[in-house]
Amino acid sequence: MLDVKHIREDFPILRRTVHGKPLVYLDNAATTQKPRQVIEALVGYYSRSNANIHRGIHALAEEATAAYEGARERTARFLHAPSERGIVFTRNATEAINLVAQSWGRANLKPGDEILLTEMEHHANLVPWQMVAKATGAQLAFIGISDDGRLKLEEYEQKLTRKTKLVAFTHMSNVLGTINPVADIAARARRMGALTLVDAAQSAPHLPLDVQALGCDVLVCSAHKMLGPTGVGVLYAKEELLERMDPFLGGGEMISDVWLTHATWNEIPWKFEAGTPNIADVIAFGVALDYLDRIGMPAIRAHERELTAYAMKRLQELKDITLYGPPAGEDRGGAISFNLEGLHPHDVGTALDHEGVAIRAGHHCAKPLMRRLGVAATARASVALYNTTEEIDRLIEAIDAARRFFQRSIKVAA
Amino acid sequence: MDQLDELYRDVILDHFKQPRHHGPLADATLTVEGTNPLCGDEMTLWLRLDGGRIQAASFGGKGCAISQAAGSMLTEQLQGLTLTEAKALVETLKGLMQGQEPPAELDLGDLESLAGVRKFPVRVKCAALSWNVLEQALKGDTQHTADSTQNTPKPLK
């Protein structure tokens, strides 16, 4: 059991009120809140160690470089990557996917090749492949989803062919909460000679990740969804893949030597980090990973699984509600999308906000999935390690209040 | 929920629950569709134009109470307006979202009730979808999709 009361004390923002009510933050799939340890790491870096890295010969530069490269090593440990050489820092998970699409995709895809995606992808794991498909003549193919929001694995079996060069898919859907069987999907792709890219933006903050056990070639995640600062994405890729890939962006830091007309590349991972990186935020991200691992990802998963089951049970007890995604269980994470009959999610979101309850409403950057579900938008509550069952009760009360508000009798002049 | 009453005034909920001029106009001479890419809301506007005058207007689409009520109130107000008057109405509604007083001579009808939306910056785009679609229609630009995040006045701080 998590000591949630103690954990909450680490998050200053959870003490604030919104519209006069204590904040209930259930928009964790968009971004998580930050513990004071992460905030202090940012302030501490700028107060004591700020310097540019990899080039200075003074004490501050050495400290900053050690802290930045320490965070890389820390990230490798968090993901159970074989070495920090496979960890590249980007601006966000989206940029990490674009890096692979541009650097690997443009050089390796040709007409007749296929990129296999799923119907539940975030735009970040869809649009970069549309762009590279257009540029190379490769085709996109899609694994459909069942009505309970799971991937149709029999369809995967059919669509995975020798033409498939890459299978790119989400570990956990940001809309449905579905946790996909990564190891199984990756093993089948490997047998067919295709690479796998896992979008772990939603799963990384919520469950233990082991890239070697998963057997994927590439995995991306996002610091700000993992208690870390905004502006940092992580690209993990197998070292031999990174070695084979050309750089994504050119500039300082990513070179070995430069002449007027050409240049040679730095070693991995620095080959993919052109220009001064986001030093402070990467260092603070390392502290966020310390925080997550100190509590323990298995314990976080167990707590959130209970919360998810409780929230789904309470929501299902409401009248005229539609819940999307699989039932609570082993393959279900804590992003819970729903719609209330006769009420648009934006109106629900605004009404809940006035009760201090923060949720997301909209298409969640997954418009093809919205079309598959037959809706324009959904409301979404998403939990994190610091949420409580009392907060779920507040969500339910706020939904009741919203319903009463919109169903009130209205008076208008004739 | 007192603060919400300002946004969802009774007249707005009335238009949402019983939209006027809803659904395709059989003899429309102009049809324009718009979406709000931020939220996915969709709106179609049907206009029957004759001699520089909007003889009839209707709307349809999927969206929140604010966007749907705005569509209903706007089409209500458009009936019989000249194109010049309709353009002036669009400008006035944009100004309303910036906190400007509408000119005394211009009748906004129920649209006046949207003044409360400007206190909810994230919801301004919901109301603006309807008149951004109208603006596209008035430009004769039926090829492009109106985007309610474009040309939307900056909300009040």
Image (tube, coloured by chain):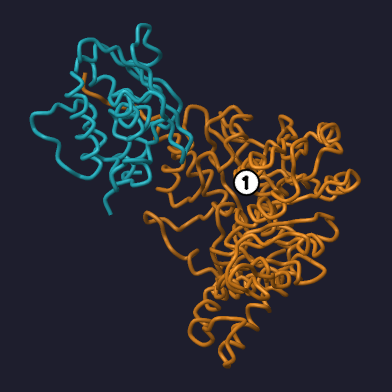
Chain colours: A orange, B cyan
Residue A193 placement, left or right of B18: right
Q: Which quadrant of the view contains residue B108?
A: top left
Residue in the foreground of this view, choosing between B139 and A109? A109
Q: Which residue is drawn at 33% across and 15% down?
A: B21
Residue in the foreground of this view, choosing between B157 and B139? B139
Residue sticking out furthest to the right: A191
Percent of width and height locating residue A225: 60, 59
Percent of width and height locating residue A43: 49, 79
Residue in the foreground of this view, choosing between B106 and A82? A82
Percent of width and height locating residue B8: 33, 36
Is B88 situated above or below A386?
A: above
Q: Residue at x 42, y 42 (%)?
A: A351
Q: Residue at x 30, y 16 (%)?
A: B57
Residue sticking out furthest to the left: B105
Residue at mark 1: A128
Residue A312 visible? The answer is: no
Percent of width and height locating residue A192: 89, 43
Circle 1 marks a residue in which chain? A
Q: Residue at x 84, y 55 (%)?
A: A215
Residue A340 placement, left or right of A354: right
Residue A131 placement, left or right of B42: right
The quadrant of the rendering that contains the N terminus of chain A is: bottom right
